[in-house]
Amino acid sequence: MSDTPGAGAVLDDRPELRDATAAVLAVDDEQDGWTFDDIPIDSGQFGELVSTGIVEKDGDEYRVADPDAVRAALNGESEVRNDSGHGLALGDALRFDFDARATGLLVATLAVVFIARTYVIGSIYRCGDIVLSSNDPYYYRYHVEQVAANAGSAADFGALSVLPRALTKGEPLTIATLWWVSSLFGGSKEVIGHVLAWYPVVSALVTSVLLYLLAVRVSSDRRVGLASVLFLAFIPGHAFRTSLGFADHHAFDYPWLGLTALALVVALTTATNRTSLRRPQPWIAAVGIGVGIAGQVLAWEAGPLLVLPVSLVVLGQTLLDVSNDRSALVGNTPVLAGVSLGAILAWSVHAATGWQTALVAGTPALLTAGTAVVIATAEAARRFGTTARQLAAVDIGLGVVGLVVFRFGLTEQWGTFSRRLDTLFRSNGTAETYGLFSADAFGFLFLLGLTLFLALPAMVWGVDLARSDRSGWLVASSYAWVLFALAVIQVRFVGELAPFLALFAGLAFVWVASWVDLSRPVLTTGDRDLRDVLVPDTRAVASLFVLFLLFGALGMVQVPVKTSQVLVEDGTYDAATAIEADAAERGLEYPESYVLSRWGQNRVYNYFVNGESQSYGYARGTYEPVVAATDPEKAHNRISGRVGYVVTTETDIEEPTTMYVRLHQHFGSQNGNVDGLAHYRPLFTSEDGSHKAFAVVPGGTVKGTVAPNATVSVETTVAVSDREIAYERQTTADRNGAFTVTVGNPGTYIVTTDSGSETTVEVTEQTVYDGGNVTVG
């Protein structure tokens, strides 16, 4: 293990060292540094004192690492609390001592994270509305509102039964938590909007605190912790997913990851011998592991992928234990207890509520079984004198056997697993399914900035540190490399990768700063001595800022770029409010008020217009064929009775006869020899013309009699968003001179023929909305 036990623990476990320790302490009290020749003990005892951390090397000499603690242990007293506060069980476990300067600097870095996530507040809170970012958050908003509408109080968990299978087998804990928190504040739609808007920011702050604690724990260097949080603030892929208003499910995953990783580090670095297992720290950590794992798999159906690093940590730690002739059972017992607790919690919730599939909810149980087998195998290998290489071969063999048993013994679960695996490696065309290094996305640059290039060498270094029996770096490296591999497959995992990438970027930054003489060397030791942050002079601060800009500037630029890409555009919001006002005036309710649009904004429109933002499936299958259609009647028949409004946005369709060009470019009016449209009343156009909204109407029919076979034009001026546009339709009279033409707009129409005759007719709104008729007098 990387951490050495305290003097009390060593002497309790090895009472034969008490006399040697007392003799060394007496010499240490008299001399400021000494050599082996100065102490009256043999080399074997001296080696034991060094290996247990009671004595440490200081240049060419030695000294007692913590004289006060050793003296207290020899006197039978509890170890004294030093200035860093390590005497506190929780503080010792987390390496957080509430030092005023360190805490102040942490608060400052958290403020940077907060600002980077909330500067878009003006785009979220508009005109009394809470406008969540992107499209999918309105799916979660809809379902949280549905649960709240059926719940009598925050304790009415039966209301969760209204959730559809897609959610109970997808993100049940996410929805349940958002509803429960909202219900504590009243559970109104407004409260739900606030909770969903702010929860990603809370996630970012909680994750940042956990990252700081993790970084300080594994490196014993507060500077690494602070630098890690700063780098996390400007990783674009994490920033936009935790920005104010982006209430997607991913932000809910990040704290569980941080909690599990931190708890693993604490468990492995505090369970150093049998005596240490009588202390609370390893078991507090075990609870953290259990809660983190259970939360991870209940929060998201892909949660089992996010607990993969735990198995790698256990495997790596047992190999280190055997390599160092150490009991794997003692050191890994809290981890086994933690994953067992996670299995119990996950399966209990699954059994009681039906959340997640049996395969997903059972993953922690499989992890528990695998952990137990790996630990038992390592313990047996140590007793039989097996080397770490031989143990690794045995572990691989056991893994293959387990996979074969899974494949042929649990065929139904294997089928589900195979389908999920296929989904992981298949792109469906959405941005989050591209690979990190895909030429279509350039995610490695636009989502991670230069942080990836700074962190990668440190990640390699982290593996080397882990091989040197540093348990903390084993955990950090396992998470970083597993999540990096997942992000390479699909960029949806970039947010999960970001905290661990930031940790290694922080490590590399401090190392580079020390290399150019801007700071003291980085520790990376994970020992009890914390390296504090010293306030440098003004010139050094400026140099550090420039150095940070060198690696972080691209991220600083890309954070607002990526965040702006998920914000709801002004045109989208304004179109939605215009449609909502029209639907309210006409008394339309869902489904008569359904809005057809591109699927990527469809939930936004329908939430604000009718509150039904559960699905964009109809829009995804209908919008593109309708706007690309060249037969207006067929297009109208396809949506008639199902669609109340149509929103068009800019696209690359240029064919004049398509519905898109007729609507978006000409507002349904006649264009040359291309007929106008009869069933679409323009309601809104954005200032730049990028968004246009139309009501789907039966239309009013104008009838009359003119010269046989005459060409008849009906034309009016329509006011749309403070603009006046011309609307015209043409038809040809029959051989008896009778004509009919349907118009989609109310107004005073000028009816002209090719012979030059002209008259007017009034078409009312009621006529247009009811499909009535008017006759030219």
Image: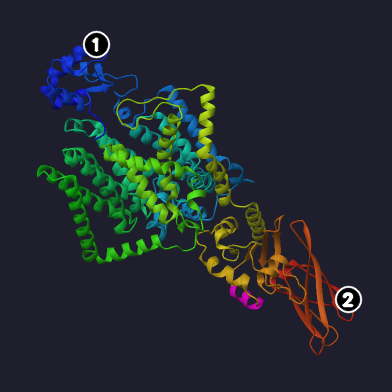
Q: Secondary structure at mark 1?
A: loop
Question: Can residue 642 be spotted in the picture?
Answer: no
From mark 1 to mark 2, how far is it between C-alphas? Answer: 116 Å
Is 633 within the magenta? Answer: yes
Magenta residues span 631-638
Q: Residue furthest top?
A: 30
The x and y percentages for residue 356 are: 34, 56
Compared with 311, 516 (above or below) is: above
In this picture, residue 715 sits left or right of residue 766: right
- The residue at the point 77 percent across, 56 percent down is 722
The amino acid type found where label 2 is placed reads Glu
The x and y percentages for residue 306 are: 35, 50
Question: For residue 700, which quarter of the picture?
Answer: bottom right
Compared with 767, 569 (above or below) is: above
Quarter of the image with the N terminus is top left
The amino acid type found where label 1 is placed reads Gln
Residue at the disc numbered 1: 31
Quarter of the image with the C terminus is bottom right
In this picture, residue 284 sits left or right of residue 545: left
Question: Can residue 610 be spotted in the picture?
Answer: yes
Question: For residue 32, which quarter of the picture?
Answer: top left
Most common SS among magenta residues: helix
The x and y percentages for residue 602 are: 56, 60
Q: Secondary structure at mark 2?
A: strand
The foreground one among 461 and 93 is 461
